Image (cartoon, rainbow, N blue to C red):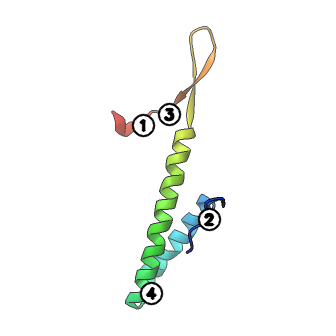
Amino acid sequence: MPQPAKNEKPEPFEKNLARLDAIVHELEDTDLSLEKALVLYEEGMKLSESCQKQLDEAEGRVEILTKKAGGKVMPEPFADEEAD
């Protein structure tokens, strides 16, 4: 799968995830040549990295709205459970 040019938007997360799922099924369910399996594995790793990057970016955008004293609603960053 070719890398998108710098000015192109990456494929949607859902599309990448669906392709990654298809690759996993193909690697599990068929008798592939070593070369084909390696090509699929490489594509899957690139898709996995892309999906992880998109998830990390989405996590950074998630905010929790908290009602402060006086009834004012303020956004706060989403707390990372692993940080504790």
Circle nearer the viewer, 2 or 4: 2
> Given the current orientation, which residue lies at the most extreme front position?
6
Mark closer to the chain start, 2 or 4: 2
Which residue is disc 1 drawn over? 80
Q: Residue at x 56, y 71 (%)?
A: 19
Give residue 73's position: percent from left, percent from top.
63, 19
Local SS, label 3:
loop
Q: Secondary structure at mark 1?
A: loop
Q: Amino acid at mark 4?
A: Lys
Determine the residue positioned at 66% across, 59% down.
Answer: 7
Q: Quadrant of residue 10?
A: bottom right
Q: Is residue 30 above or below residue 59?
A: below
Q: CA distance from mark 4 to mark 1?
A: 39 Å
Residue placed under numbered mark 3 in the picture: 78
Percent x, y for residue 18? Answer: 57, 68
Q: Nearer the viewer, mark 1 or mark 2?
A: 2
Q: CA distance from mark 3 to mark 1?
A: 6 Å
